Amino acid sequence: MADTVREIERKYEADSTTRLPDLAGIDRVATVVEQGVEDLDALYYDTPDQRLTAAGITLRRRTGGRDAGWHLKLPAGPGEREEIRAPLSDVPPPELTSLVRARVLDRDLVPVVRLRTRRTVRELRGAAGAPLAEVAVDEVWAWPAGEAEKPGAAGVAGRTEARWREIEVELTGGGERDPGLLDEVERALAAVGVHPAAAPSKLARALEETGLRPARPEDRTATVASGKGAAATRRKNFGEKESGKKGSGRKGSGKKGSGRKGTAGDLVLEYVREQLRVIVELDPAVRRDVPDSVHRMRVATRRLRSAFRSYTKVLDRGVTAPVGGELKWLAAELGVERDREVLTDRLVTAVADVPRTLRLGPVDARLRIWSERHRAESRDRVLAALDGDRYLALLKTLHALLEDPPLRPGAGRPAPEIAARAVLKDYRRLARRVRTALDAPAGQDRDVALHRARKAAKRTRYAAEAARPALGRPAKKFAKRVKRVQQLLGDHQDSVVARGALRELATQAQQAGEGGFTFGLLYGREEARAADRERELPRVWKKASRRKYRAALRP
């Protein structure tokens, strides 16, 4: 079973002459306690092309010290990482390798570099004797994995042993860890000439100094998304000649445009690359059941699919349509879990609003049992999807699409021109669906029509958000107004789904002899809530569909 700790630390350069100052003199630190010396031996794993290192992730097997075992470190913000630990074993444990699957894809994880560290530890304690932080002075030896069994052995040509000294300061005060203490320690270290380390981690320095870091190519998904990479791809696909002219596009002002120049291809590919980045980064969070991670990953998946459908003048629909189908599948798998979360929160809140005198029978217990059963089913489904071959194939396809994008002639046009057309096209589709919904008879037909309008609103909003770098504030304002329509329609659809769940709960309660009065009461309230949203729609839509908002989008 893997354990997780939040690592908050800073590293500093040191040499044989470096001496630590008296840290007991800084605020909050009452005593400094010697903790002795530890000998650590760590073997770091990565793909041959070092994909984990490029993402700021480390995977190591370490013996010695108080936390021997496997350690996977994931970025968690400036100066912070999530360290996920597993017991020692001969090979990387599945509970850790699954968390980097979206990074390594089908590449093998192999030993890359070995580090031996002699660590002298001092613990900083507060006035009550509670530990606040650890200060470690590390003597580090590093060499390529498999090339030498001990420091000092000869390596292959171009790869050498590295040796250095550094200082680590890490907060250890449990839930009361205060990063401000690190600032105080840093000031004390600076006063004696100790400065922050240039390398972000021991691994990064080891790879650099042993000659193991490969020449860093442009990011796989960035090459075609900006700058010369995108321009070169356009020239290749369209047969364009090299030109000395500056990129087309309009100059931005505070009202229209952000000042960015570029083509529609630049705009769309950068947006696609960003959504893929979000999906990959959220993968381990979804696997670890981090709150809101499923929702955010599902949104990125939907945005990506929406971009393929909205910007058909830029990307060949014949190529992106099958990819969009796979993204729809992934969003659906994630949606089972996310929809359960939203529905459960809605029902729990609704039950809490019912006076106790009207809560007849074990309503809370019935709802809890229903939620836990559905949670287990949806959770298993999400993990099965992420562990499956289909998901891996989708990620590989998306990377390949960005490396060799199926650009159409419109990709070479100015970004504002193509972006405005795409947004307005989606708006017209939304307007047709809203009119259809308003004209539909009350009941199931209107519910279905409103749900279709909601999906069109979401697509229009995403198209406008993707256009913001090219269209600036007008796109931002337009997206905000369409979002209000989407939210109203979303609340209506949530009410439709909630009524289905309440009917299921009432049936289960009756079969168990508990009575379904309270669930029937909630069903009626949801009907009234949906009717309120239907009455509000004409007003909200009239405001969002004003001609001036669309006119502001045009270049």
Image: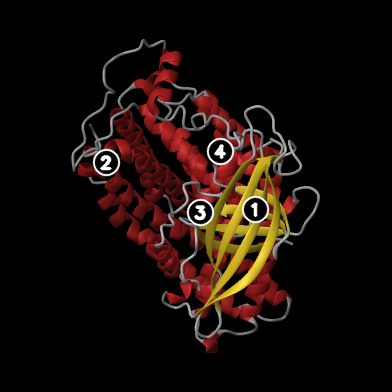
Residue tagged 3: 14
Measure the alpha-carbon separation of dots 3 and 2.
48 Å
Question: Which x, y percent locates residue 299?
Answer: 49, 49
Mark before the other along the chain sequence, 1 or 2: 1
Measure the alpha-carbon separation of dots 3 and 4.
17 Å
Snapshot quadrant of residue 324: top right
| Picture disc at residue 72 | 1
Tag 3: Cα neighbours inside 10 Å, few (<14), some, or many (≥20)? many
Element at label 2 = loop
Q: Nearer the viewer, mark 3 or mark 1?
A: 3
User: Could you tell me if residue 192 is visible in this image?
Assistant: yes
Measure the alpha-carbon separation of dots 1 and 2.
40 Å
> Disc 1, disc 4: CB below 8 Å?
no
Residue tagged 4: 208
Amino acid, disc 3? Ala
In the visual, does 62 lie left or right of 438? right
Q: Residue furthest right?
A: 90
Locate the N terminus by quadrant: bottom right
